[in-house]
Image (tube, helix red, strand yellow):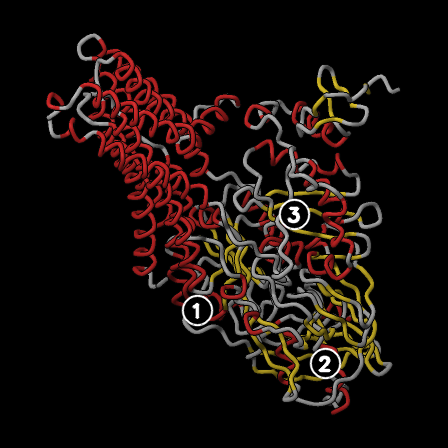
C-alpha cells in the first residue's frame, strides 16, 4: 500500500465529510476519500486560506448521488454540449456556468486553479458578483461531463438550465434574506405584545410568574433571530477576522451581541426585562435596510444590454440588396456580410468560400484558423482576408461579447484613485469605530451602566462605511447608463474615471472628423492613361467591397451597383492599402508608396490605383466634415490640448488649421508613427484620449489612456478600444467629457456627505442618548441617502449637459 494511504474503515473525508469506504488518502493527520478532495485542501492550505474550513467544516459535501457520473450522463450528448458551449474551435471549448455556492475568496481561488485538478482545463475565471465561472478546456484531454462532475464533487455544482438557450438562471439569492426577515419580523411583533406591561408601565399589576413567563417566552422567540436572522453578520465578521480584517459586520455583530447578552443577564438575574424588543427590532430593521439596498441596487443595475446600446451595425443580405441593420434586429437565419477585420457578432455558418478566422479575441491565440464552406463560425472571431457571407444560427448574446471585451488581454491596468481611496477609508473606518465605541462605553460604565451599553451599541450601529463604498460604483454606473442612452458605450466603470483625468485629445481624420462614405469622388488618370473602363470599375468595386476602411466604402458607394466578381489572394495592409486578384488581374488600391508611385496627388484624400503593376491614376475624395465640427473642437480646445494624426497627405492642412489653431497636425502617419506619438505624449505626463477608426487605429486606441472608436453604419468594433461612439453623437463628445468630470466631483461630494453624517451620528451616539433602535434605522438610511444623492445628482448632471437618461 502507498505510504500516503491507509485503511478507510470508519474514517470521514476532511474535505467533503463523506464516509471513506476505500483506502483513504492521508495528508499529515487528515484523511481524504479521493485525490480531488486532497488537492483542493492543498490548494487552500498553500495560499493561507485554511479558514475556509472554519466557515464550512465539509465544504465539498454533496447531495447523495450528486457527483455520480450517471447524474450528468446527459452532458455526453453532443446537442447538449453544443447548447452549453459558447465557443468550440478545434480542441478548445469555452463554457460559462452559474455556481450559486461561490461565497468567498477561497471559492474564487479554488475555481481559478481548476487546471490543477484537471489538466484538460486550460484556464478558468470567476465573476464573483454574478457567481459565474467561465473556463476553457481541451476537448481532447477532458470532457464537459467530467468537469461538471469534478465541480459537484468539490462542492460547486453548476446550475444548468437547458430550457433557455442563453443558459440564464433565475436569481434565488434573495429567498434566504426573506426567510431571515420573516423570522425577525415574527419575533419582533410577538415580543412587543409580550412587552406591553413594560410599555404601559403596569408591570406592578402583573403577576410575577406571568412576568417571568413573558420574559422567558421573549427569550425563546429571540433565539432564532440570533441564530438564524443575524447569522450572516456573525459569519461575515468571523470571515474578516480570520483573514486579518475588521469589516463592517464586526461592529454590527458586537452591537447585536451586546444587546442580547445584556438582556439574557437581566432576565436570568431577575434585575430587569432586558432589551429583547430592541434586539429583534434592530436585526429586523438591519435586514429590512439590506433588502431595500438590494432592491435599489437591482433597479439601478449597471449591466448593459449589448444589443440595446452597442452602436454597431452589420450588413444584411436581402432580396433588395445589402442593407445596414443594428445588432438588435439581427435574427437567426439572417445572411450577413463580414468584411476583412470585422468581428463575427453571432454564431454563424460560413457560406461558399473558404477563409481564415482570428479567434484571439476569444482565446488569446493569434494564429488564424482555416475554415471551409459549411463550417460553424463562433461569435467573437475576426475575419481575416476577403469579405465572407454567413448565415446566423444563434441570436446575438446580450453579454458574451461584452465579457470578451473585458478580458484581461484588452484591459488597461490603470489604478483607480477613487476606488483605491474608498478601499483605504473603508478598511480604517471600522477599526476606528470600534475604538470609539469602547472608549464611550468605558467613559459611561462607572456612571450609568445601561447608558454605557446604549452608547457602545449605538456607536457600533449608527456609523457605516457602506455609503463610502457605494458612492463610487453608483455614480460611475449611472454615468455609464447616461452615456449608453446617448449612444456612447463604455467598456466598464473605470473608463468613466479615466475620462475625468484626460488632458489631451487626439483625432484620426478619415471616418472620424469626416463622414464615412459621403465624400465627393473623382478619378484622375496620370499622364498617358485613359479614364476607367466599365470593366475596371467593376473590378475595383469587387475589391473594395472586402474592406471596411472609410475610403474603401466611399469608393464602393461611388462605383454604383453591378455584378461582383470573385476576388482571390485578398490582402489588406493597415495604413497602406488593399490588393487582390480580380478576373486574373492584380489590383492595388492605397497610398502612393503602396502602389509604387512616387508623385503626389492633388488636394483632398487620395487613393492610388494600379493594375498589373501599371499605375492608372488616383481617386480624389473631397471629404465632407461633420456638421458642427468647428464648434465641437472649439469647445474641446478650452480644456484640452488637441492634435490630429492622419494617414492621408497634407493637402487639407490649410482647411484643418481653422479647427486646430495650435497647429498640431501630423499627416502621412503610419499606424506605428501614431502609436509612437501617443507614447511620447504619455511619457511627458499627458493623459491621452484617442478618437479614431476602430479597425485601422487599434494600436493607438489600445495605447492611449482612453481609446474611443467612432462607428457609422458599419461593424467597426475593435476590442482594443474602451468605448464606441455612434457617429451621429460626435458633437456631444465635449458633453461626455464634462459629465465624466461631474461624476468625479459627485463622488467626492458623496464622500463629504458620508463623513458629515457619520460624524454627527457618532457625536450623538457617544452621549448615550441615541437608542440602538434609532441607530438601526439611521444606518441603512445613510447608505440609501448617499446612493440616492449619487444617482440623482449624476442624472441631473447628465440633463444639464444635454444628455438625458
Q: Earlier in the sequence, mark 1 or mark 2?
A: 2
C-alpha gap between disc 1 and disc 3: 44 Å
Up-down: is 656 above or below 359? below
| In contact (CB < 8 Å): disc 1 and disc 2 | no
Task: Give the residue at mark 1.
Answer: 629
C-alpha gap between disc 2 and disc 3: 53 Å
Give the foreground label among 2 and 3.
3
* Image point (22%, 25%), residue name: 765
Task: For label 2, count other residues whose C-alpha is less than 10 Å away and answer few (under 14), some (14-19) or many (20+).
Answer: many
Question: Number of numbered discs present?
Answer: 3
- Foreground of the two, 352 or 19: 19
Up-down: is 385 above or below 401? below
* Image point (74%, 53%), residue name: 75
Q: Quadrant of residue 249?
A: top left
| In contact (CB < 8 Å): disc 2 and disc 3 | no
Q: Quadrant of residue 355?
A: bottom right
C-alpha gap between disc 1 and disc 2: 31 Å
Mark identifier at residue 134: 3
Task: Give the residue at mark 2.
Answer: 617
Amino acid at each position: 500500500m502507498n505510504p500516503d494511504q491507509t485503511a478507510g474503515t470508519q474514517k470521514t473525508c476532511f474535505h467533503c465529510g463523506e464516509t471513506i469506504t476505500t483506502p483513504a488518502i492521508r495528508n499529515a493527520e487528515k484523511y481524504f476519500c479521493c485525490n480531488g478532495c486532497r488537492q483542493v485542501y492543498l490548494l487552500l492550505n498553500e495560499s493561507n486560506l485554511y479558514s475556509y474550513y472554519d466557515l464550512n467544516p465539509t465544504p465539498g459535501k454533496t447531495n447523495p448521488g450528486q457527483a455520480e457520473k450517471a447524474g450528468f450522463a446527459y452532458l455526453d450528448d453532443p446537442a447538449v454540449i453544443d447548447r452549453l458551449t459558447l465557443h468550440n474551435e478545434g480542441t478548445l471549448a469555452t463554457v460559462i456556468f452559474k455556481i450559486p455556492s461561490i461565497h468567498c475568496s477561497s471559492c474564487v481561488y479554488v475555481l481559478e486553479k481548476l487546471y490543477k485538478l484537471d489538466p484538460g482545463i486550460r484556464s478558468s475565471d470567476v465573476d464573483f458578483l454574478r457567481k459565474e465561472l467561465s473556463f476553457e478546456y481541451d476537448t481532447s484531454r477532458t470532457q464537459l461531463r467530467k468537469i461538471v462532475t469534478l465541480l459537484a464533487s468539490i462542492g460547486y455544482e453548476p446550475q444548468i438550465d437547458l430550457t433557455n438557450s442563453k443558459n440564464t438562471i433565475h436569481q434565488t439569492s434573495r429567498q434566504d434574506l426573506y426567510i431571515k426577515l420573516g423570522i425577525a419580523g415574527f419575533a419582533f411583533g410577538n415580543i412587543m405584545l409580550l412587552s406591553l406591561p413594560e410599555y404601559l408601565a403596569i408591570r406592578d399589576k402583573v403577576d410575577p410568574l406571568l412576568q417571568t413567563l413573558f420574559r422567558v417566552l421573549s427569550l425563546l422567540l429571540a433565539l432564532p433571530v440570533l441564530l438564524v436572522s443575524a447569522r450572516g453578520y456573525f459569519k461575515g465578521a468571523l470571515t474578516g477576522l480570520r483573514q486579518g480584517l475588521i469589516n463592517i459586520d464586526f461592529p454590527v455583530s458586537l452591537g447585536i451581541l451586546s444587546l442580547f447578552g445584556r438582556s439574557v443577564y437581566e432576565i436570568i438575574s431577575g434585575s430587569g426585562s432586558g432589551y429583547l424588543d430592541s434586539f429583534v427590532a434592530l436585526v429586523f430593521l438591519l435586514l429590512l435596510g439590506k433588502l431595500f439596498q438590494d432592491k435599489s441596487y437591482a433597479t439601478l443595475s449597471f449591466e448593459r444590454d449589448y444589443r440595446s446600446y452597442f452602436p454597431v451595425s452589420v450588413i444584411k443580405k436581402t432580396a433588395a440588396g445589402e442593407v445596414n441593420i443594428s445588432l438588435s434586429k439581427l435574427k437567426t437565419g439572417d445572411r450577413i456580410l463580414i468584411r476583412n477585420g470585422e468581428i463575427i457578432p453571432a454564431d454563424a455558418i460560413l457560406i461558399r468560400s473558404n477563409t481564415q478566422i482570428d479567434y484571439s479575441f476569444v482565446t488569446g491565440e493569434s494564429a488564424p484558423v482555416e475554415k471551409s464552406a459549411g463550417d460553424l463560425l463562433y461569435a467573437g472571431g475576426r475575419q481575416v482576408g476577403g469579405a465572407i457571407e454567413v448565415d446566423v444560427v444563434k441570436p446575438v448574446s446580450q453579454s458574451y461579447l461584452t465579457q470578451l471585451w473585458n478580458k484581461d488581454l484588452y484591459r488597461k491596468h490603470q489604478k483607480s484613485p477613487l476606488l483605491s481611496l474608498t478601499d483605504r477609508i473603508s478598511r480604517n473606518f471600522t477599526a476606528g469605530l470600534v475604538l470609539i465605541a469602547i472608549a464611550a462605553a468605558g467613559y459611561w460604565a462607572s456612571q450609568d451602566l445601561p447608558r454605557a451599553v446604549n452608547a457602545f451599541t449605538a456607536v457600533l450601529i449608527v456609523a457605516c462605511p457602506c455609503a463610502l463604498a457605494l458612492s463610487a460604483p453608483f455614480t460611475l454606473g449611472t454615468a455609464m447608463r447616461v452615456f449608453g442612452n446617448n449612444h456612447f458605450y463604455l467598456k466598464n466603470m473605470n473608463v468613466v474615471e479615466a475620462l475625468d483625468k484626460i488632458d489631451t485629445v487626439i483625432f484620426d481624420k478619415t471616418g472620424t472628423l469626416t463622414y464615412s462614405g459621403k465624400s465627393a469622388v473623382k478619378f484622375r488618370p496620370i499622364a498617358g492613361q485613359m479614364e476607367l473602363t466599365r470593366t475596371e470599375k467593376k473590378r475595383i468595386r469587387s475589391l473594395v467591397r472586402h474592406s471596411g476602411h472609410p475610403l474603401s466604402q466611399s469608393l464602393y458607394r461611388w462605383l454604383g451597383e453591378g455584378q461582383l466578381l470573385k476576388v482571390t489572394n485578398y490582402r489588406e495592409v493597415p495604413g497602406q492599402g488593399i490588393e487582390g486578384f480580380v478576373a486574373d488581374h492584380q489590383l492595388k488600391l492605397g497610398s502612393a508608396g503602396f502602389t509604387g508611385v512616387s508623385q503626389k496627388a492633388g488636394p483632398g484624400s487620395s487613393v492610388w490605383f494600379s493594375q498589373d503593376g501599371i499605375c492608372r491614376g488616383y481617386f480624389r475624395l473631397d471629404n465632407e466634415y461633420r456638421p458642427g465640427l468647428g464648434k465641437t473642437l472649439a469647445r474641446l480646445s478650452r480644456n484640452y490640448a488637441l492634435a490630429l494624426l492622419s494617414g492621408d497627405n497634407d493637402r487639407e492642412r490649410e482647411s484643418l488649421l481653422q479647427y486646430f489653431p495650435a497647429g498640431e497636425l501630423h499627416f502621412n502617419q503610419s499606424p506605428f508613427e501614431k502609436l509612437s506619438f501617443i507614447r511620447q505624449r504619455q511619457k511627458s505626463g499627458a493623459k491621452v484620449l484617442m478618437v479614431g477608426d476602430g479597425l485601422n487605429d487599434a494600436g493607438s486606441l489600445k495605447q492611449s489612456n482612453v481609446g474611443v472608436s467612432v462607428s457609422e453604419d458599419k461593424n467597426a468594433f475593435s476590442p482594443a478600444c474602451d468605448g464606441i461612439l455612434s457617429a451621429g453623437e460626435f458633437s456631444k463628445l465635449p458633453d461626455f467629457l464634462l459629465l465624466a468630470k461631474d461624476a468625479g466631483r459627485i463622488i467626492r461630494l458623496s464622500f463629504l456627505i458620508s463623513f458629515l453624517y457619520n460624524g454627527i451620528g457618532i457625536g450623538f451616539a457617544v452621549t448615550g442618548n441615541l437608542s440602538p433602535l434609532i441607530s438601526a434605522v439611521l444606518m441603512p438610511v445613510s447608505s440609501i441617502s448617499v446612493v440616492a444623492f449619487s444617482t440623482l445628482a449624476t442624472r441631473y448632471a447628465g440633463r444639464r449637459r444635454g444628455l438625458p437618461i
